[in-house]
Image (cartoon, grey):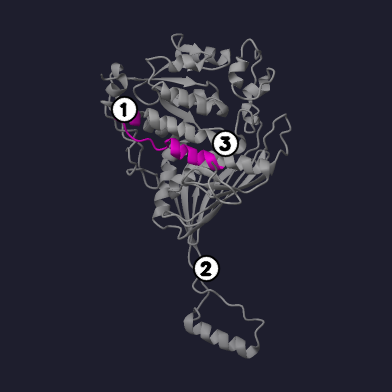
């Protein structure tokens, strides 16, 4: 018997368009051509979605999803009554709201769910929704704990339902351009990747606002806590959950995971084999139990798509310079720099000769060496300036990579197609971020098998059972 899901997939789609101009990034190569306009969809063909977790990310994801043609928002779940009230203020009183996400996934009229809850709920809610026959857009990181990853992948495989992880940089034309530059050999041989994502604000450090009516009456505290350690009601823990290991994944799970997903796209990589971390809680002494400064070092092995290289990641939540972001792929012939709106390729002109150091040689040896040197590198008539070339590729005005990510998700749902960040990809991006926390807490180097997605014993280097 045909299902509503089968009927939706009969409506083939193309994707959103992006304008083109000189130095403006365009994309014609993505597997799903996701930036062509969606075909007109009749009301009966709408994809009906619900959002589980109506915090800042939930509201933002919902607004973005509704920019895709043919999407209807029908239900929302959250443990704070005020967010449910606000959802109905925006999207109408007919919007079904509940504190219990299970009421949403039990509904037959919902095709897909957005999971934007605190990290400690991602794995369970993703599995429950997949088993209930829903397509799932799960915010990053896909899981809070390494041991949850394979269970989620198994559920996705067994149910056959669509799962995409919400690291939108994987869908970005900015990163896609960086990938094409790298694959063209523009920077020579890659040897290092470095990134920083620094901030200098209370909101940037997760000190989110707490509503005046926050109380055990307006917040379903026990449902929020779930399987985490039981505690008395604490509004700070509820509304600023990223600050606590019980519910979040700290800086690595919030920010590093974006970098890993982007790196893996550009380099077609499965991840690092060694993870090392250092940092501390230096400034935001507000009761949190995660660091506000963290540095990560990662060793990537040689693969068919990239050489062995070293990567450094840095976040400082109290950067007196105002913060800022920079992401660089460094090769022996050039550098690719990715920013929020553009990708830049910088290449330094090669030196005409290597130079020499003969000052400590005896005079006759200096003369002999220089004579041989000049036979190989004839002296230029005049010293030459060594210049650099720079090409900047800028995204069109108003470009939104999250919209591309949702478009990919809904296109795949309609066409039984492929998403750009499935569960395995999402886990491979989450795992080194989570292992950064493990290394920080244990003060040890963590060995990781990025292909099998397993921690390796540091002594035997054999996979854990």
The quarter of the picture where residue 111 lies is: top left
Q: Start and end of the magenta stretch?
A: 412-432
Is label 3 in contact with label 2 (beta carbons under 8 Å)? Answer: no
Earlier in the chain: of badge 2 and badge 1, it is 2
- Find disc 1 in the rendering and name its residue: 414
- Find disc 2 in the rendering and name its residue: 385
Count of all numbered marks drawn on residues in the image: 3
The answer to whether residue 275 shows anywhere in this view is yes
Q: Residue at x 65, y 24 (%)?
A: 229
Q: Percent from the top left, x then y, of residue 413?
A: 34, 28
- Asked whether 421 falls inside the magenta stretch, the response is yes
SS label for mark 1: helix
Q: Which mark is residue 237?
A: none
Is label 2 in contact with label 1 (beta carbons under 8 Å)? Answer: no
- Find disc 3 in the rendering and name its residue: 253
Residue toward you, 158 or 20: 158
The quarter of the picture where residue 370 lies is: bottom right
């Amino acid at each position: 018997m045909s299902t509503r899901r089968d009927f939706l997939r009969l409506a083939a789609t193309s994707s959103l368009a992006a304008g083109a101009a000189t130095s403006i990034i365009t994309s014609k190569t993505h597997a799903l051509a996701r930036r062509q306009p969606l075909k007109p969809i009749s009301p009966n063909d709408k994809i009906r979605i619900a959002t589980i977790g109506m915090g800042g990310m939930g509201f933002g994801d919902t607004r973005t999803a509704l920019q895709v043609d043919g999407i209807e928002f029908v239900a929302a779940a959250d443990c704070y009554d005020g967010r449910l009230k606000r959802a109905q203020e925006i999207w109408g009183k007919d919007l079904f709201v509940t504190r219990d996400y299970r009421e949403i996934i039990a509904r037959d009229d919902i095709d897909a769910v957005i999971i934007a809850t605190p990290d400690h709920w991602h794995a369970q809610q993703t599995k429950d929704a997949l088993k209930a026959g829903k397509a799932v857009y799960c915010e990053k990181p896909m899981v809070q704990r390494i041991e949850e990853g394979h269970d989620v992948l198994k559920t996705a495989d067994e149910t056959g339902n669509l799962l995409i992880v919400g690291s939108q940089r994987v869908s970005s034309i900015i990163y896609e351009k960086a990938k094409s530059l790298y694959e063209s050999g523009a920077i020579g041989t890659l040897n290092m990747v470095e990134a920083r994502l620094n901030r200098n604000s209370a909101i940037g450090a997760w000190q989110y606002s707490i509503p005046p009516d926050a109380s055990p009456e307006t917040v379903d505290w026990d449902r929020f806590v779930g399987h985490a350690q039981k505690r008395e009601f604490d509004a700070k823990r509820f509304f600023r959950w990223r600050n606590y290991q019980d519910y979040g994944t700290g800086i690595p799970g919030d920010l590093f995971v974006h970098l890993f997903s982007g790196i893996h796209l550009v380099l077609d990589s499965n991840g690092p084999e060694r993870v090392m971390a250092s940092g501390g809680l230096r400034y935001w002494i507000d009761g949190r139990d995660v660091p506000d400064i963290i540095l990560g070092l990662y060793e990537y092995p040689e693969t068919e798509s990239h050489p062995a290289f070293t990567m450094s990641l840095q976040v400082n939540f109290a950067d007196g310079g105002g913060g800022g972001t920079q992401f660089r792929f460094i090769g022996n012939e050039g550098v690719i720099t990715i920013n929020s709106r553009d990708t830049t390729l910088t290449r330094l002109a090669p030196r005409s000769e290597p130079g020499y150091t003969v000052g400590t040689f005896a005079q006759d040896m200096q003369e002999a060496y220089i004579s041989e040197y000049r036979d190989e590198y004839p002296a230029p008539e005049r010293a030459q300036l060594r210049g650099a070339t720079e090409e900047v590729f800028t995204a069109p005005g108003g470009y939104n990579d999250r919209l591309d990510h949702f478009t990919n998700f809904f296109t795949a749902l309609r066409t039984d197609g492929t998403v750009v960040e499935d569960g395995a990809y999402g886990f491979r991006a989450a795992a080194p971020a989570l292992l950064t926390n493990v290394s920080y807490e244990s003060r040890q180097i963590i060995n990781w098998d990025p292909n099998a997605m397993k921690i390796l014993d540091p002594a035997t280097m054999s996979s854990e059972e």
